[in-house]
Amino acid sequence: MLTEKDEYGLSQKLLTKHISPLYQHFISNYKLGLKGIQKQKLFYDNHLMSLTSIGFFITIADKLYENSVYYFFSEEEILEELYKYLNNPLDYHLEGFILIGRFDIADSILLGIEGEHVNEIWSLNGDLGHERPEIQMISEDIFSFFRLCKEVIIEMSLKMRDINTSQLYRNWGEDFWRVREERD
């Protein structure tokens, strides 16, 4: 029976063998998983909601592609994906990619781990009815990908609630925004 230390050692060997040093650097230096990306919050109607997202906007084949990063897989989730890649490959695995995260709108984030696409970040189209390729390259590596990103206010969410950004404020010591009622 493997001890926890043995399992950790095997996991590290698997990562070292299949994941490039560049992405390993990302894994070891940044917080990953569902709580990895910190977004601004808004206190509205007695609950907290997301006020911002991490968006990116690029042009691919003369068309604007935009999306928001939901999260990057934790190390454990990356290991699970590597096991799938090695033992029960899907179409994108056969092309040398593994899933490393999710976008907000149905798409997934892929990392090239072999062949000519090593280190590249691609998008896997989760909306098969949409007129765009199933997978498309976004950037040459994870750090180039983040240079395309910026924190953006989720305007649609505010508009649905008739909130203007001029109404937003924060109290000293709070880590969320509030809505100031407009006076007539």
Image (tube, rainbow, N blue to C red):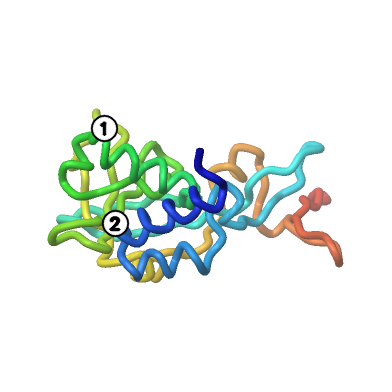
Q: Quadrant of residue 166?
A: bottom right
Could you say where residue 175 lies in the image, as x and y percent from the top left?
A: 77, 59
> Furthest residue to the front?
1
Instruction: Tell me which residue sits at (45%, 43%) in the image.
Output: 104
Q: Quadrant of residue 85?
A: top left
What secondary structure is marked by label 1? loop
- For badge 2, the amino acid type reads His
Q: Residue 88 has which mark?
A: 1
Q: Vertically, is 154 above or below 115?
A: above
Q: Is residue 56 left or right of residue 1?
A: left
What secondary structure is marked by label 2? helix
Could you say where residue 70 lies in the image, as x and y percent from the top left?
A: 49, 47
Nearer to me, 31 or 21: 21
> Furthest residue to the top?
129
How many numbered badges does the structure rendering display? 2
Q: Vertically, is 124 above or below 9?
A: above
Could you say where residue 20 lies in the image, as x and y percent from the top left?
A: 30, 65
Residue at mark 2: 18
Q: Residues within 10 Å of mark 1 (few under 14, many from 20)?
A: few
Given contact means CB atoms under 8 Å apart, are the residues at marks 2 and 1 in contact?
A: no
Instruction: Tell me which residue sits at (38%, 36%) in the image.
Output: 106
Nearer to me, 170 or 99: 99
- For badge 1, the amino acid type reads Asn
Instruction: Tell me which residue sits at (56%, 60%) in the image.
Output: 31
> Furthest residue to the right?
172
Q: Which mark sits nearer the N-terminus, 2 or 1? A: 2
Instruction: Tell me which residue sits at (53%, 65%) in the image.
Output: 30
Q: Residue 173 has which mark?
A: none
Could you say where residue 172 lies in the image, as x and y percent from the top left?
A: 86, 67
Q: How far apart in space, not on screen, are marks 2 and 1 (Cα)?
A: 16 Å
